[in-house]
Image (spheres, helix red, strand yellow):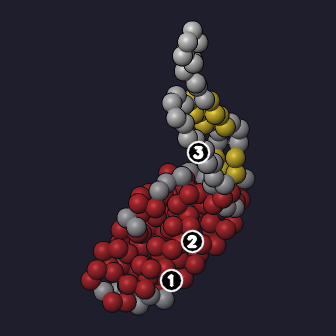
């Protein structure tokens, strides 16, 4: 008021950095200026899925396809793509090298598209689609893709 300096603009700063397993949350509330920076690598819990767990899920999907009751030609088509994905995943397990996740993902996408088309036309395939969707949702983060990639 009388000869006092006006207050300087207050500033606030907040930062988070480093590797975090799970999720990162940063919240801030400010009346005026705010700078917030968040850095770090986030390891999703399902990205830590082991290759043997992935192979088990693929085998579970194979069993579901074989016991689904859908026509043999559709079963064969899905199993062909699933076999290619499973073989690539097993390469990693056997040779301790990184699997070609793009190849696995593309093959599983074909399986997913076939299941999705069948579930729209066949009652027997509806249960298969539900089982397949759950398995693909579990595998998607390991592949580094969103579940939308599979049309889910």
Q: Which residue is mark 3?
A: 27
Q: Is residue 6 above or below residue 18?
A: above
Q: Quadrant of residue 2?
A: top right
SS class, disc 2: helix
SS class, disc 3: loop
The crowding category of the residue bearing disc 2, from other C-alpha atoms within 10 Å (few below 14, some 14 to 19, many at least 20), is many
**Residue 96 percent location from the top left of the image:** 72, 53
Q: Which mark is residue 58?
A: 2
Q: Which mark is residue 64?
A: 1
**Residue 28 percent location from the top left of the image:** 58, 41
Q: Is residue 31 above or below residue 86?
A: above
SS class, disc 1: helix
Looking at the rendered structure, the number of numbered marks drawn on it comes to 3
The numbered mark, 2 or 1, whose residue comes first in the sequence reads: 2
Query: How far, Cα to Cα, is label 3 from label 1?
Result: 44 Å
For the N terminus, the quadrant is top right
């Amino acid at each position: 008021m009388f000869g006092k300096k006006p207050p300087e603009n207050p500033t606030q700063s907040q930062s988070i950095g480093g590797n975090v397993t799970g999720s990162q949350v940063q919240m801030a509330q400010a009346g005026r200026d705010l700078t917030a920076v968040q850095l770090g690598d986030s390891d999703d819990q399902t990205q830590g899925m082991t290759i043997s767990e992935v192979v088990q899920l693929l085998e579970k999907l194979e069993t579901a396809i074989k016991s689904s009751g859908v026509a043999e030609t559709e079963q064969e088509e899905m199993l062909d793509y699933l076999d290619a994905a499973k073989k690539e995943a097993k390469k990693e397990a056997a040779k301790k090298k990184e699997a070609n996740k793009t190849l696995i993902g593309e093959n599983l996408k074909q399986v997913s598209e076939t299941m999705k088309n069948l579930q729209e036309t066949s009652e027997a395939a509806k249960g298969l689609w539900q089982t397949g969707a759950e398995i693909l949702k579990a595998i998607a983060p390991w592949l580094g893709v969103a579940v939308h990639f599979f049309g889910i």
